[in-house]
Image (cartoon, helix red, strand yellow):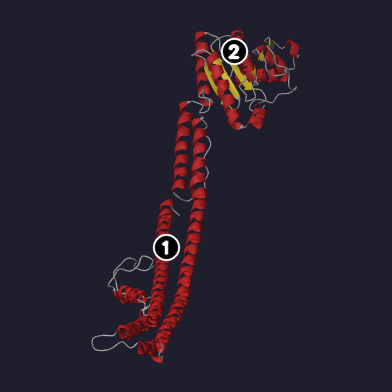
Amino acid sequence: MKIARIMNISNMFMFCFIAVFCLIMHQLYAAVHDYMEMENKKYTSLELAAELRNSSRLLTENFRLYIMTEDPEYERKYWKIVEERSGITPRSHDKKVAPGETVKLNDLLQENIFFHDHIPTIKKANMLSDDLIHFEASTMNMVTGSIHAEPDIIKAKELAYSAYYISKTHEIMNLLDIFYDDINDTSKIITEKFKTKISNYLVMSVIIFIMFAVITLLLRIYTYIYIYSPINRITQFANTIVNGNTTQRIKTNVNNEIGKLCFTLNLMLDKLQDEILTSGTDPLTHLCNRRFFEKKLDELKMLTQYRSQALSILILDIDFFKRVNDRFGHLCGDDVLRCFAENMRKCCRKEDIVARLGGEEFAILLPMPASEAAILAERIRDTMEKAGILPDGTSVTCSIGITQYAPGEKTEEFLERADQALYRAKEEGRNRVRILEKASFSAHGSGVNDGEDGMSDIPDAGGAAEGTSAPRRGASS
């Protein structure tokens, strides 16, 4: 599936999950807000009911104390409570509902009762309390008398403790008790509903969050497997191309845009490889490649016959190169090949043909006799021995075979003789230079003794033998 389609689907899912989650959070917030508002109204309703109960009790106490003692202080307290309840004077600051405001208690009850179903009960209790205020006011007038009536304290005392008055005060308190019970029962039911509602929203939000986390995890896994990992492989592959290795191809099993990119890169590298082969350059070392080398060899052979000038060849092979790859890795091996190529270039002249034949085997064509070529060969060998290019600071050495072209001979014979010279260098302990002339090569091929076959020794700066045998040309050494 294409990455764009996957991302569009994932974005759609993410948007849906976020929208649903936000909706659930909004509903949860609304439920919690309603619950807090319900609790606040419940608290206000109970406070107002308690205020009605306390004010009714205080009115009864001050009314009876005034009747019994005729002390005007109790009358003053009585009318202060009445005026505060009636909204004539501001409410005291110790009130928990509307402190310091000038408002009727009856109005507060109607505005702040928890449920409208409870208003009739509390309203009836308040009306009975107001009726008793009229009854108590007329009874207190009997103590002082009026224009139309003489004081009658005995009658006032009888009314203050009459069955009617007592029944009315009890009825007020009973109505308030009923109001309290109704408020508590209703609040319990509503609280349970709110708790269930909030729990459901919380469970839904947790489920949505888990689904969101799972989908996010799956997207991360998909991104790692089908996007990040292939891109990382492409990056590593690009580094190998930068290092000159254009023979490798990237492998991928993803069927998306990245897979198409890998396919396109491989096609591009195929074309690049063809161009490199036709251009005559080795991609890793930037030396001449084998095809260009063979072409230049044919040209130089013709010039040698035409101008009667010498032509020598050096066949160079890095000693124990396989051990370098096994110990330090192939990337280190590539660095060794590049360093070896660079050292050869520095030791040679511009007109010399320096080529990589393949693997760790190199060749140099020199328009000079073999004796002079040997001096150059020894310089290259000595340079590599002292270079210290391995990660642990040690050096790699090379073995070099030299021969001079004999006019008229075939290219195969020329190269085979140079190869035999290289073989002798390796067989005698590696890290050395050996020259093999045509006449001695023919004699050696016919069974002539090694000491009489014309093999020339070049003095070595070092290099103890590591083994007594060396592989043939093209084999790992």
Asked if marks 1 and 2 touch (Cβ < 8 Å), the reply is: no
Q: Is residue 426 above or below residue 264?
A: above
Type of the residue with mark 2 = Ala
Q: Position of residue 26 (x, y in %)?
A: 39, 64
> Is 347 on the left or on the right of 151, as rendered?
right
Residue at (71% x, 14% y) in the render: 443
For mark 1, give the secondary structure.
Answer: helix
Residue type at mark 1 is Met
- Tell me the residue that label 2 is attached to: 406
Crowd class of label 1 (few under 14; some 14 to 19; many from 20; radius 10 Å) = some
Residue 253 appears in the rendering: no
In what quadrant of the picture does the N terminus appear? bottom left
Residue occupying image coordinates x 60% and y 16%:
314
How far across and how far down the image is residue 311, in percent? 56, 12
User: Which of the 4 image quadrants contains residue 369?
Assistant: top right
Side of 135 where 457 appears, left or right: right
- Residue closest to the eye, 135 or 428: 135
Quarter of the rendering containing residue 410: top right
| Residue 466 on image: x %, y % | 73, 21
Residue beneath label 1, please? 25
**For the point 40% across and 58% down, which residue is it?**
15
Residue 322's place in the image compared with 254, above or below, is above
Element marked by disc 2: loop
Farthest left residue in view: 147
Q: Nearer the viewer, mark 1 or mark 2?
A: 1
Q: Which quarter of the rendering shows the C terminus?
A: top right
